[in-house]
Image (cartoon, rainbow, N blue to C red):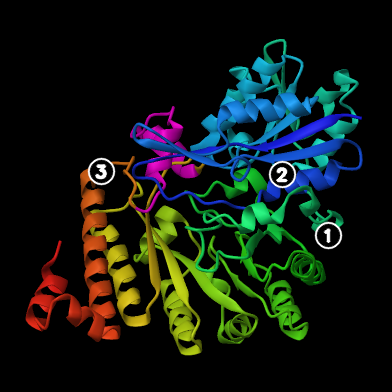
Amino acid sequence: MIKLMLINPPQEYYKDSMGFNVYFPLSLLSVAAAVKEICEVRIFDCLVSSFEVKRTGDSVIYGTPFDKIEKAIRDYAPDIVGITAPFTTQSQNAVKVSRLCKKISPDITVVMGGADISVSYRQKLENDECDYCVIGEGEETFYEFIKNFRSKSSLSRIEGLASKEDGQIKYRPRRYIEDLDSLPFPAYELIDFDDYLRSKYLYLNWSTIGKNSISMITSRGCPYNCVFCSVKLYMGQRFRANSPGYVIRHLKHLKENYGITNFHFEDDNMSFDRSRFEGILDGIIENRLDIRWDTPNGIHAGSLDPVLLEKIKRSGCRKLIIAIESGNQSVLDHVIKKSISLESVLQVVKDCRRLGIDLGAFYVIGFPGETIGNMKETVDLALELFRSYNVTPYLFIATPLYGTELYDECVKRGIIDENITGRALSVATQACGEPMIFTEDFSTDDVKSLVHDYYRSRLRYERIKYSVRHPVVTLSKVKDKPALLLQKLLFSK
């Protein structure tokens, strides 16, 4: 029987990039579930196995050291190694694992997949960084790959699989999976849940309910056209989803068999189909699942109304994040191309405050076509909703991810390097990231200055809010000098 090893590589973070998180490797678990009956499968997750933290210069590498990865591969002696590269910012470590496999044995067939591979497969194959690439959804493509592996001549005909033959890249697209209910649950039995649940990094910078939690994705595809988003390049624009009944069974399976009570719905469009989303909420309530959940990837505010929000509250939601993006309607309409009105967003904010739903919001500044004034409107809106409605702001800088409309626009204007490094993206995509985009209307320093002023104002307000909530603690720190305290809160840098 064919021996398959699926690897989630180590991750590297730099001085100004967002903190490290451990997460359940859903993509590998889903692929494993599709092929486990026709091959021997082992999952090796470098984020939990022989885990170490190693500092090198201004970066930190989290995960299994490469000498131990090498030993694991040699001990298992796989015919095929599948490597996931879910983030462009981390693809360099996927390549390192691939090269390690070839060092161990040139006979190991290396297949790479994940969001980054779906947009960079030509580069990976042209540079001989792997043997095959799975593009988009992997379950059906990888099943056919394993089934036909022994007769290698037929592999190039598999839809969704890219390869290099005689110096030419061969690839035939595969139709997206329409019936997601036909897919089995991820192969959770192939991992040790305790390895994840015991990790202090489990969803640490991802969620406020990180402990005893797991991510779930109940739908695929994004029908919207936001210029900065790469989701549709990987999952397509056609919205497809699991039925409410499937989702409820999945939740029960995880709770009853693994004791999970906290869930992160990472759908990009959890509420796009109103009746489906409401059916899931009703199922959670009627089955008395007694779970807690949040939406760390955000949810479209335009799909929310008071009736739905009441069910969201009753079903155990602990944090709802909406994607506002900009404080200027013209920027939303013509620059970001996001179909939402600021008027409807404000109503959602008010409804959440009334219902006691903890709310956060994503904002992005620094797009070509924006002005400094436009960006200030976004910063002002973020701070105003934070102060008046306690909406936690998450401010990001626009980053031209490869393959997006934003990337193409920046290349066309000649304002970015076409060969963006993983390191540059890793820093740029974070909340305090280094801007990459500049135009005739603003410089990267202008963007950094706005971000600095935003965080200074936010910190000042948070200090005041803390002082009001904890007066005894605060006053004790300044030894009965309230005037000095007020001065520190208002004017500290």
Circle 2 residues within 10 Å: few <14, some 14–19, many ≥20: many
Say whether residue 482 is visible. Answer: yes
Image quarter of residue 275: bottom right
- Residue drawn where x is 81% and y is 69% of the image: 249
Instruction: Look at the picture and state if 102 lies above or below 47.
Output: above
The residue that label 1 is drawn on is: 181
Badge 3 vs badge 1, beta-carbon distance below 8 Å: no
The residue that label 3 is drawn on is: 444
The residue that label 2 is drawn on is: 28
Compare marks 2 and 3 and give the one earlier in the sequence: 2
- Residue drawn where x is 61% and y is 82% of the image: 308
Disc sitting over residue 286 in the figure: none
Task: Report the Cα–Cα distance between label 2 and label 3.
Answer: 38 Å
Q: Can you give x and y, in whole percent of width and height, for residue 390 in the image?
A: 37, 78
Give the amino acid type for the residue marked by disc 3 in the picture. Thr
Direction from residue 258 to residue 379 in the image, left or right: left
